[in-house]
Image (cartoon, grey):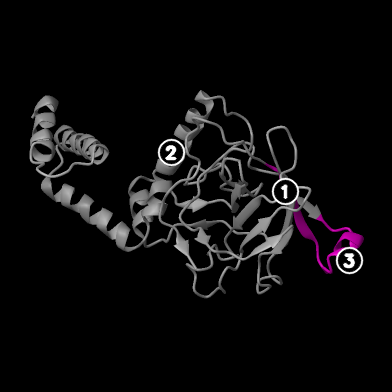
Amino acid sequence: MTHNEIDQLVKNFIVDTATGDVNPRIQQVTVRLLSDLFKAIEDLDLQPSEVWKGLEYIADSGMSHEIGLLAAGLGLERFLDIRADEADARIGITGGTPRTIEGPLYVAGAPESVGFARLDDGSESDEGEVLFMQGKVLDEDGAPIAGAKVEVWHANLMGNYSFFDKTQPAFNLLRTIVTDAEGNYQFRSIMPSGYGCPPDGTTQALLGQLGRHGRRPAHIHFFASADGFRKLTTQINIDGDEYLWDDFAFASREGLVPEVKKVSDPQALDSRELSKPFSSIDFNFTLHKERSGAPDAEVERQRASA
């Protein structure tokens, strides 16, 4: 079939059969995606077995709750960020802290504290490296924002996230910190580990067929938000990780790899009641003010809630 014939066929299937109320946007998207799919089947001469295997793969990914991983691993989530950056730039929103992907492992409802929080439950302190991370939330002019929310979450030493990993207590390595009057936030945690897609999962199965690994560098996720400002979704990556610039999820960006300082000074250790050296990261978040005509910075999607 020609592409024009396929377009007409899809119109016959989707548009001409409508007898009830139509959502124009849903119809528009369905027609476009179905037309593109039919054309790919025709152009690539996909056989019925291949089509059904593809449908089965999508179903399996849904049942295993790996759609979020798949979106990251195929670059879909990064592509959405690229488009968001372009949309911002068209109305003059540039600079500030770079956005990057959210990933599928955020959990809503974390405990809040002002200024400081300890993220870890202490169970991995002996084998892990203590991390202190601190900084400010600033506006575009460099002024501190009091009362901003910094939501933070990261993996444990096994590369697992609480809530999804039922061996961890609720909200382990997950907190919301409200900045103090000077815009400061700080938290204590352990240095996170990188991780990979489940080796027997649907995402890694496809990545393997594409000759790709499914590894992520060690990283820490953030939402940063404040009244009158655009919500920032971002993460920092831990410098020195072997996958720092080879992230299967394409989330590594310049400006999101802060220096990791190793602290061994006895006075610094004593002040924190530590007996071994720790790591320290300084990082400021710069938020853009809300403005008329700006695209929505809040992404509506299903998220876990505990």
Q: Secondary structure at mark 3?
A: helix
Given the image, on which type of amino acid does mark 1 rest?
A: Ala
Alpha-carbon span between mark 1 and mark 3:
30 Å
Given the image, on which type of amino acid does mark 3 rest?
A: Asp
Among the two numbered marks 1 and 2 on one chain, the one whose residue lies closer to the N terminus: 2
- Residue stretch rendered in magenta on the structure: 263-285
Alpha-carbon span between mark 3 and mark 2:
46 Å
As drawn, 92 above or below 269: above
| Residue 299 or residue 216, whichever sits in front | 299
Given the image, on which type of amino acid does mark 2 rest?
A: Leu
Among the two numbered marks 1 and 3 on one chain, the one whose residue lies closer to the N terminus: 1
Q: Is residue 212 visible?
A: no
Residue named by callout 1: 146
Residue 166 locus on image (x, y percent): 49, 74
As drawn, 85 above or below 150: above
Q: Residue at x 56, y 66 (%)?
A: 158
Residue named by callout 2: 80
Residues at discs 1 and 2 in contact (Cβ within 8 Å): no
